[in-house]
Amino acid sequence: MSLTVPLYGFGGGGASLNFKVVGGTTKPTNPNENTIWVNTDKKIASWTFSATQPKTATEGMVWITTNTSSSIELNVLKKSDVIVNLHSAKQYVGGAWKLKNAFCYQNKKWTQFSQIRLYYYNRGDLCTADSGGWGYNSNVTFNSDHILLTGQQTTTRTLAHGKTPVPVAYKTMYIVGEVVSAYSGVALELAGLCNYSFDSTAAQNYGTVGAFTINIDISTVTKLSDRLAVVRVGFNSTIKVKIYEVYFE
Amino acid sequence: MKTYIDNEFKCHLTDPNGDLREVVLSESASEFFFNKCATFIEGYRVKPDGETWIREDGKVFSGGEMITPWKPYDELDVAQRQYEREKLADAENALAIYLGGEV
């Protein structure tokens, strides 16, 4: 059984608690079971576990968000079972909650439960500060909450691409969208990363009609000039794909 | 060109032990690997549509056909450029011989 309970604390841990919260930018060596490491260069003044945003916050406070399920189950007390599911970690810095990378040490290994996400496109927001804006060729329209790609009856794939290469720290690319119509099982084609000549370096093809969320491993493409984010479709005017989100973790 | 994959979806161009799986590439994947050298192709992973691969950090990849390098892409790019230079040199030599008048 798991329940969401508000827990508050100061410092790393406590005598009756079954875990410890630590900060810093280097993964702790020789951690104890249930050590929670929040990757931050800001001092952790206090911490709280809660499914909902704390009503009050102080500079440096860490908020571990909890959920009904997650990849990390934590028994928070030494002498009785109170299980929480860790969902993400945020820290209150400069008047705002900032998402942080965070890990929990269990069964002799670290598991990441909180990851900073970088958006290049988010439901109408071009995220220009990070994406550099979007380039595109024919048959691309930017709508209020999606990019629409329509295929062409030529040898040119309809495409849109972020202008700024994706930072190397990001290992996984996500595309959230909808295949409105496909042609012979072809819709999204060679979507992923490419170089400045638009030659693919890491890609996925997806052709099932309906909503989708796909991800692409980009961890071994480490030169910036090979890391342009691109969404494109196959060669047929029947093909229509809506792109709602493009982000990286 | 026959392409095989192992249990980690890594590409192979031969199956000497008969323990690999032959994979039918999509048209765009075939296009992607067209004119690529063996080192480049075998540095890639092809996860077929509908199957699942789990990266060593636990991240799960499913969805469509995924074509991604498992070796550092830089190394594959260097190998491919060397292959293209060699092919160009071969073509130039053949042209020189032809223009030199040998039939």
Image: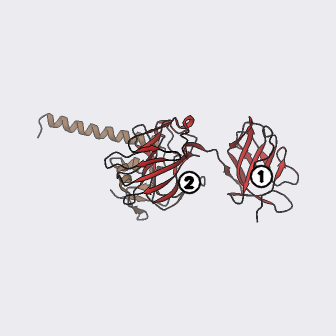
Question: Where's residue B30, x and y in %?
Answer: 35, 53
Residue at the outermost right position: A15
Q: Is residue B15 left or right of residue A62?
A: left
Q: Is residue B16 visible?
A: no
Spatial CA span between label 2 and label 1: 30 Å
The residue where tag 2 is placed is B55
Write the residue at 76% across / 66% down: A1
Query: What is chain B's hue in the picture?
Result: brown
Chain holding disc 2: B
Q: How is the image coloured?
A: by chain
Indicate the secondary structure of the residue bearing disc 2: loop
Work out which quarter of the rendered image holds the C terminus of chain B and state it.
Answer: top left
Q: Nearer the viewer, mark 2 or mark 1?
A: 1
What amino acid type should be assigned to the residue bearing mark 1? Answer: Ser
The residue where tag 1 is placed is A50
Query: What is chain A's hue in the picture?
Result: red
What amino acid type should be assigned to the residue bearing mark 2? Answer: Arg
Binning the other alpha carbons within 10 Å of mark 2 as few (below 14), some (14 to 19) or many (20 upward) gives: few
